[in-house]
Image (cartoon, helix red, strand yellow):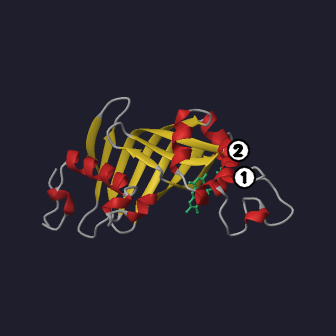
Amino acid sequence: MPAPETSNYPGLSLTLPTLEQKSWQQLVTVLDNSSGETTAPGFKTMTVASRTATGADARTVVLRKVDADRKYVWFHTDVRAAKVMQFEAFPDCTLLFWDEKSQVQLRLTVETRLHTDDYVADEHWQTIGAGNRKNYLSEYRPGSEQPAPYPGFPAHLGAGLPSAEESEAGRANFAVIECRVLAMDYLQLNRSGQVRALFQYEPESKMVWLAP
Ligand SMILES: Cc1cc2nc3c(=O)[nH]c(=O)nc-3n(C[C@H](O)[C@H](O)[C@H](O)COP(=O)(O)O)c2cc1C
């Protein structure tokens, strides 16, 4: 199939293995504070799309960990959240990333696995600070109806941080969602021509260019 005549088309200078490696590296460096300038700051958060008994659901979460070699990503949530029930019933989800700076969309097809009372959750809990732990101190289930606006943590904390001891109460509500990546659909927007490719890891490994 002929490539577009214009020499500005970014697809001309790419190979599938390099593009795959670069995409994973962008996810890794977004978490690496020491690397300074990140090429894809938008990858700090992602949309997690899940199935429900009656349809579909989606929400934003923060990317917490990436294993580029084993093709895993992780995020954190409150174990009482509605999404956790959805992942338990339907482990197959889509993680959607969009980075404005590089104009790249990554669509990851994943299989989720819940970690609560195990060493994986313990390890992640140790990595998060008091500000983040505060999110797990809610007295109420996320999404439960309240008689008045509720801040998501005990009122006495206000704008302050919980002490290390206070924050430990959040551990019981803390969950890690491990996502085994089955496939990555890459799309880069560009006026000189878009680039789309599929990197599939399971059930069989393959890399292929796609029409955008
Ligand atoms: C920028 C941003 C980051 C968020 N990060 C997380 C997160 O890491 N984990 C989480 O459970 N919810 C996070 N939320 C809240 C979720 O989007 C969602 O509202 C909440 O988890 C309830 O979702 P659920 O009802 O589908 O369980 C974030 C929201 C925003 C706007």
Within 8 Å: ligand 1 and the Cβ of disc 1?
A: yes
In the rendering, which numbered label is found on residue 80? 2
What number of labels is visible? 2
Residue 7's x, y, as percent?
Answer: 12, 66
Q: Which residue is drawn at 17% across and 61% down?
A: 4
Q: How crowded is mark 1: few (under 14 residues within 10 Å), some or many (20 or more)?
A: some
Q: Residue furthest right?
A: 147
Mark 2 residue type: Arg
Q: Taking the image as drawn, is residue 44 in sight?
A: yes
Sequence-wise first label, 1 or 2: 2
Residue 202's x, y, as percent?
Answer: 37, 32
Q: Nearer the viewer, residue 20 or 28?
A: 28
Within 8 Å: ligand 1 and the Cβ of disc 2?
A: no
Q: As drawn, is 9 to the left or to the right of 100?
A: left
**Secondary structure state at the residue bearing disc 1:** loop
Q: Do the residues labelled 1 and 2 touch (CB within 8 Å)?
A: yes
Q: Which residue is drawn at 65% across and 63% down?
A: 161
Q: Which of 82 and 170 is in front in this view?
A: 170
Q: As drawn, is 94 to the left or to the right of 167?
A: left
Q: As drawn, is 70 to the left or to the right of 97?
A: left
In the rendered view, would you say 45 is above or below 181?
Answer: below
Read off the residue under disc 1: 142
